[in-house]
Structures are given as C-alpha cells and as structure tokens.
Image (cartoon, rainbow, N blue to C red):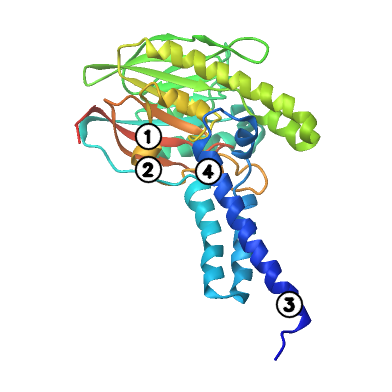
Amino acid sequence: MTPSPTRSWITPLLRAAVILSLLASAALGLAFTLDRGPNAWIELLRYVPYPAWLAPALVVFLASWALGWRWRAAAALSPLLVTGVVMGPVWGHADNGSGRLRLMTYNIKSFLAEERVGGFDLLGLEISQHDADVIVMQDADEFTQPGAKMPAPLEAAFKGRQVIKRGEYMIASRVPLRDCSAPKMPGKREPHHYLRCVITVDGREIDLVTAHLFSPRSGLNAARHDRLAGLDEWEHNLAVRRNQVESIARDLSRQPRPLILAGDLNLPEASPLLRRLLDTGLRDAFSSAGRGYGFTHGHSLRPYISFLRIDHILVSPDIGVREAFAGGREGSAHRPVVADLLMQRLPE
C-alpha cells in the first residue's frame, strides 16, 4: 500500500518542526546560560513572556504523536528545555544557623495603589500577612514626601516598627535602624539613589541596602514598537542599568559588615548584570532556599501571569537563608519577596 499524498508531505513537515523546535530551545537555553556580555539581544529575550517559548514547544510535542516514539521523545525535549533551563527554576535547600530575621522586599507602586479602589487595603493585607521584621519598599513616593499622610491600612501594617523614608524608598523595621543615607548611582539623565542603613540583630551589625534599578520598560517598548530602530534605545537602557550595578558593586565591596541587598533590581538572576553583584560574594536568597520559579512581575501585563523574577534579596555568605518565597499578586504589579534569614550561618 502506498502512503496517501497528504501523509507524504505532513510527515516530513512534522519532523522538520520537531528538529527546529529542539534546535531553537537548545540555542535559547545555551544563550541564556553562557552569555557573559551582556549581549543586548540576549538580554532583550530574557524579558519575553515564557509562553512565547513554551507554547510552540508544546504544540510541536502534541503534533509529534503522529510520528514514531523516537520523534515524540525528541519533541518532548523542547518543553523540558524551556521549563528546566530557559524559565530558570531553582531547587534550594535551607541553611542552618541562628538569629532569625524575616525580611520582605516589595515594590508597592504607591501611585497605582492610590488610583485603585481599596488599593491601600490590599497592600496593607499583603504586608500584614507576612509579618516581616524588616520591610524594604520601593516606589513608595506617595508616602515619603514632606507632609504626606500614611494611609490607615499601612499605618496598621507598620505598627511597632521604626519607619525610615528617603526618596522613593521606605524601610519599616522592628530591629534598630541607624546611619541611614541615600548614596547616588547613575541615572538616565540625572543621578538616582539607593537607600542604605545599618540594622542591629542580636547585637550584630548588618548593612541593609534597598535599591530600585532603572526600569527596562522604555527600552522594551522601543524594541517592540520600532523593531530594529528601537534597539539603540534598548542598548542605552541596558547601559544605564550596567552603570548602576557597577556603582553599587564598587560601593558595597568596600564595606566590612555582613550585607543584605534587597529591592526591585529589574534584572533576572541569570543576567550578567545581576551576576556582577553576585560576583562580589552575594547570593540570591530565593535560589539558595526557595523552590520553583519565584516569578514576581508580569501579572499586570498581558498575558496577565507572573513571568519574570526581577525582585531579589541578596545576602553575603555569612548570612543564612532558611526559606524564601514570592508573595501574592493582588497588592501591586510586583509580588513581594520574603526570606527568613539567619544572622549566624553555620557551615555545611
């Protein structure tokens, strides 16, 4: 029996789709893993929602059931590469130690909360639910200006904590805060700042830093709408964040105390820019003790799911991490990151 004309061209087409899907997934995984640049194109691809990579791989896998088992097995590798390499899952383990401190970083987007009915209630609920000892917040401009009144839900959530306000930043802490300053870092047109304080936990002094790096939004929008013509804006956007990272890394490398750096860094962990901070000796709390993807941003954008992990808690090696996780999506365009830290980490 001769094969039907329809099957004679569908089978080669499906096989070609399996090969192309596997090559594309492998190339993307290798690019994300091996990039040390950062390369502007690869950095741009890191911000693409993962369904753009996962959906075609799954479609090809389903279509491969019309082929033999070897082709099905080859097609299954593509979604495995996307979910296991491109999307960046972690499988951490808890450290041992003493001096527990729960820390939460949260970009609260206060200007958006003010525009939403019940926006401050949702923020207050999220903050109260995790009951962190130290809460560092970014995009809190609505509450940090002179004479600004704190909404009642947030006042209740911060009860019993010392509150420090500088620029867009707020820190609410149950442990003592002192020597707070706002060092400069480069910006697009004028300097930006980050906030730095010293906290004391069980008699030990720790440097606490919260930072909000330049948003990739303008560069991403330029690349999306103007295609190749927008690449210059994206490269400039990337250069601003590179300069900010270098500035912070230089500042913090000279400090003798243990360090916690937390905030909306607008960088996935695999980005060479974030690895520049990790190369100073810091480690990511979620990667150290969290499990899964820990995505914190994207749910306010189409396709309305969290698909980026750009909010981080980084700690020096002598600080342990017992647990780390991302919070809820209801209060802000960013999920908070919560980590149970150990001020005295025991060697493994």
SS type, badge 1: helix
**Which sits earlier in the primary sequence, circle 2 or circle 3?**
3
> Extreme front residue here?
2
Picture layout, residue 215 above or below residue 33: above
Separation of residues labelled 2 and 3 (CA atoms): 49 Å
Q: In the shown orientation, is residue 199 left or right of residue 209?
A: left
Q: Callout 3, which amino acid? A: Ser
Going from N to C along the chain, the mark reached first, 1 or 4, is: 4
Q: Secondary structure at mark 3?
A: helix
Residue named by callout 4: 30
Q: For numbered disc 2, what is the local secondary structure? A: loop
Q: Measured along the vertical axis of the image, is residue 95 above or below residue 292?
A: above
Residue at the spot 56% in from the left edge and 75% down from the top edge: 68
Image-based side of 123 in relation to 199, left or right: right
Q: Which residue was labeled with disc 3?
A: 8
Instruction: State the CA–CA distance, disc 2 to disc 4.
Output: 24 Å
Residue 285: which disc? 1
Looking at the rendered structure, the kind of residue marked 4 is: Leu
Q: Nearer the viewer, mark 1 or mark 3?
A: 3
> Visible in this render: residue 264?
no
Q: Amino acid at mark 2?
A: Gly
Q: Circle 2 is placed at which residue position? A: 290
Tell me what residue is drawn at x 76 percent, y 30 percent: 230
Q: Badges 1 and 3: C-beta atoms under 8 Å apart?
A: no
Q: Where is residue 277 drawn, in percent x and y?
A: 44, 23
CA gap, disc 1 and disc 2: 7 Å
| SS under mark 4 | helix
Nearest-to-viewer mark from 3 and 4: 3
